[in-house]
Amino acid sequence: MREAMHGSAIPHPFADGGYKKLLIGGEAVDALSGQRFESRNPATGQRLATVAEGAAEDIDRAVAAARAAFEGPWSRFKPFDRQRVLLTLAELVDRHFDELSTLDTLDMGAPISRTRAGRQRIVGLLRYYAGLATSIHGETIPNSAPGDHLSFTLKEPVGVVGAIIPWNAPLSSSVWKIGPILATGCTLVLKPAEQAPLTALRLGELALEAGVPAGVVNIVPGLGGVAGAALAAHPGVDKIAFTGSHTTGQAIVRASAGNLKRLSLELGGKSPNIVFADADLDSAVPASAMAVFANSGQVCSAGTRLFVERTIYDRFVAEVAAFGAALRIGDGMDPETQLGPLVSQQQLERVIRYLDIGTQEGARRLGGEGRLTQGALADGYFVAPTVFADVDDGMRIAKEEIFGPVISAIPFDDMDDLVRRANATPFGLGAGLWTRDIGKAHRLAGAVRAGSVWINSYQTMDPAVPFGGYKMSGYGKESGTQHVDEYLNTKAVWIRI
Ligand code: ADP
């Protein structure tokens, strides 16, 4: 990757160009191999840090530290103690929020307006898990077994968890793993994405500051195929919590077979966003545009298949394209920026390839000049928001996850046909519906096979409301009370009286 040629260095205490070590057993340590990799700002090419590159032997060490903490000091933490630690961590994340959100922006490119806006949800997530920490319990269950027996259940932490997260929202993804781990009494080896490892490392430091015992939270950056694969296959890991692409999810399922570890998988999607002619179009236009363009399309639940009722199709699609064309694209550190760069050269190439595919498939491209290279944009991976109109269900741009600012707009006429087409995908993460007809809304909310359905909004999230996929978008919920169940075993105890 190029050195930065434009833009002055942005002072940040954790992205000062220095060397960042792995966090294992409460200590900052080098990778055993001594290997390092660079983390760079995708908007400018500027080096933010050199990071110790974890590999299989570092994962071994981290898993051993996590096991020792699980069986040792952490096992003596009562629910109140875990709650207190989580509340302290929430306090610290709140106090350091500007620093953490800026780190996300520098490391993966999302506009500062977006990363700063996550404060309530991210701090709220930690407080929510703090609440759950004192609400975990089994049940007393009447039984009909011969003789007199008392039967009850215990909820126990699954043990050492390996978490593997992507680069598109590092702070949020890290908190989504650390929260339930601390609430349930599990321990963690977190492997952040190699494209954006810094926020997770900083969060690991804050966890120690919050009073989490050494070894409970270990952070091991490294390559997916090396450190990630070693974690997924590790016989000492009891569960993998993974967020990322469905192909890597499949690799993790295979790698986990050795010890049949538990899995939760939050994978990709090709979510339908459906607009009826009776919708409030003033809200539906900007929301349908941002359902894809937000975070430059690098969101697993993006509403990338935009189904629009034919009677309003041309006008609606033109307005969405115009909305996209007016978005301010640039360095995420500029408070006015609405869309930042894609995260990497590889991601840029992938998106450009899909723009070519859409054109070759005969879709009508509205706006979208492809890669943007004017002025300082030349130093980053910027792509213009693009709408493909007249897309056919069979086209690759209607079927495959692009993970860029690209909408595939598809007309529809008939409701039953629409349901079949909306569900004709291997994925099922989210779905949007825009209508003023409450009957239609309920009928479709039931018929769409997806883990979240948003009616007259898109991608609204809350710590108490479960999020997670159907079909090849994965299994296991994050947020909501189900989330802690993903980290618990249920043990039945029988007592003959
Ligand atoms: P993307 O293609 O969007 O980068 P991935 O699913 O490949 O998404 O990446 C998500 C996370 O999975 C990252 O932390 C990455 O390093 C990790 N990863 C990639 N390949 C593997 C693998 N074979 N085993 C385990 N983790 C992996």
Image (tube, grey):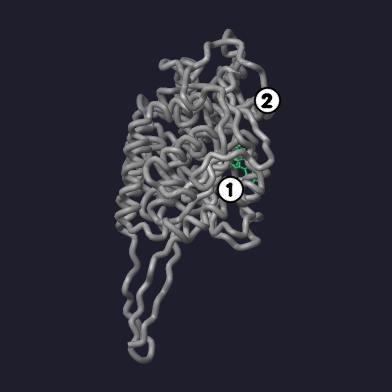
Q: Amino acid at mark 2?
A: Asp
Q: Which mark is residue 356?
A: 2
Q: Which mark is residue 97?
A: none
Tell me: residue 158, above or below residue 189: below
Residue 148 location, x and y as percent? 33, 89
Residue 60 location, x and y as percent? 62, 52
Quadrant in the picture for the C terminus: bottom left
Task: Work out how far the residue at label 2 is from the one at label 1, CA to CA, in angstroms.
Answer: 23 Å
Residue 76 location, x and y as percent? 38, 60
Residue denoted by label 1: 426
Q: Earlier in the sequence, mark 2 or mark 1?
A: 2
Q: Is residue 281 visible?
A: yes
Q: Is 345 or 135 nearer to us in this picture?
A: 135
Tell me: residue 379, above or below residue 404: above
Tell me: residue 481, above or below residue 379: below
Q: Residue at x 52, y 53 (%)?
A: 66
Instruction: Report crowding for label 2: few under 14, some 14 to 19, many 20 or more residues within 10 A (C-alpha).
Output: few
User: How many circles with numbers are drawn on the protein?
Assistant: 2
Quadrant in the picture for the N terminus: top right
Q: Amino acid at mark 1?
A: Pro
Residue 189 location, x and y as percent? 53, 48
Q: Residue at x 66, y 42 (%)?
A: 32
Quadrant housing residue 236: bottom right
Kindly state the secondary structure of the residue where label 1 is placed.
loop
